[in-house]
Image: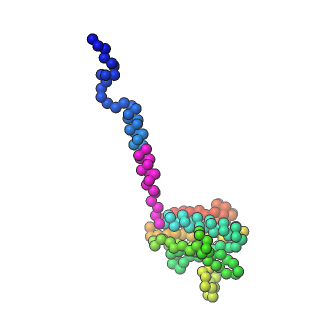
Amino acid sequence: MQARSPYASREAGLSLIEILVGISILAIVAFAVTLTMAPTRTPLQAASDALSARLQVARDEAIISGTPIGLAIDDFGTGYAFYRYLDQAWWPLSDHPALRARALPETVRLVAREAMYTASDSDAAAAIPVIWFDPAGLTEPFRLRLETAEASVDLDWQDSAGQTSGGLTRSAGL
């Protein structure tokens, strides 16, 4: 009689190694799919992210240039622009790539909730900012609200005595 190999009588099936290889291939494919799927951002989230970043740039520009930088909001809150105070007048920053005038998405509106308003000059052709960043870094606290019909986002600037020591905080509303 011939001796049979113990492996020859093995039942057909999958080994542990084959199962682990299959699971690892599935994990790699699932990981690749999740990387290709970008998280969906609403126009409100995109607008609040962009405005937050631009407000920080405006503050830095005011400190670096030594001149006040202000934010003016369009009449119906459909857009905004940044201005520099120079030679006793507000001048638009149209040549600055981050601080040029911007239009908001159609469904988003910008409202100044708590801001230091200035008296309107009837002879002035340029808009007068509702908020501005002081070159010394002493910016008055303000609150801006970006809103749609469904939700809103508040952007709060606290002074150096506040909790955020001169920074911007965001809070989402309904």
Return the residue nearer the eye: 38 or 167: 38
Q: Considering only vertical position in the picture, is 71 above or below 48?
A: below
User: Where residue 158 sits: x, y (%)?
Assistant: 64, 65
Q: Nearer the viewer, residue 3 or 30?
A: 3
* Residue 38 is a magenta residue: yes
**Magenta part of the protein: which range?**
28-43
Q: Position of residue 26 (x, y in %)?
A: 39, 43
Figure check: 22 above or below 122: above
Residue 169 locus on image (x, y percent): 59, 62
**Residue at 55% in and 66% down:** 50
97 horizontally vs 34: left or right: right
Picture quarter containing residue 58? Answer: bottom right
**Residue in the foreground of this view, choosing between 42 and 157:** 42
Residue at point 44%, 47% (across, down): 31
Asked if residue 157 can be seen in this view, the reply is no
Seen at 57% across and 70% down, the residue is 144
Q: Is residue 171 left or right of residue 17?
A: right
Magenta stretch: residue 32 in it?
Answer: yes
Task: Give the camera-side residue of 98 and 173.
Answer: 98
